[in-house]
Image: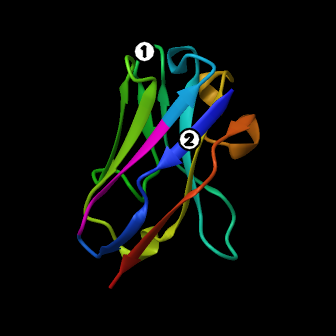
Amino acid sequence: VQLQASGGGLVQAGGSLRLSCEASGFALDSYIIGWFRQAPGEEREGVSCMDGYDGRTLYADSVKGRFTVSRDIAKNTVYLQMNSLKPEDTAAYYCAVTQILWSYVESARNYNNWGQGTQVTVSS
């Protein structure tokens, strides 16, 4: 079971990036996929999540209207499209999976498989 996150980089404020989270060893459509971020000195924060089975999504208030999560079942990959990026979006971004009930998907504690982080840096 492995998750591979990629797509981070350096972008100016107002720009866009698309992060990818590719799964191997298991099918993403049987899991809930969460995107989290962590800035230096800060706690890990939930950004978005998607039910890999039915596609329902959830977004943190701080990213609503700017970030969109999507999936490609054939590629076993989930994407996080990030638009209108702000300096405060700067963080290491992680994807993770869980099979917890949807009511509990916002907490990082409920995710048991994590990919490595990909750094997103937004300059002002």
Residue at the location (28% across, 76% down)? 13
Residue 93 in the image, given as x and y percentages of width and height: 54, 56
CA neighbours of label 2 inside 10 A, class few (<14), some (14 to 19), many (20+) = some
Q: Could you tell me the amino acid type at mark 1?
A: Asp
Asked if residue 6 lies in the magenta stretch, the reply is no
Q: Label 1, on which residue?
A: 54
- Of 27 and 99, the residue lying toward us: 27
In the image, is residue 73 above or below residue 37? Answer: above
Does residue 65 appear in this view?
yes
Q: Label 2, on which residue?
A: 4
Residue at the extreme bottom = 124
Q: Is residue 10 left or right of residue 116?
A: left
Of the two numbered discs 2 and 1 in the rendering, the one whose residue sits closer to the viewer? 2
Q: CA distance from mark 2 to mark 1?
A: 22 Å
- Of 106 and 96, the residue lying toward us: 96
SS label for mark 1 = loop
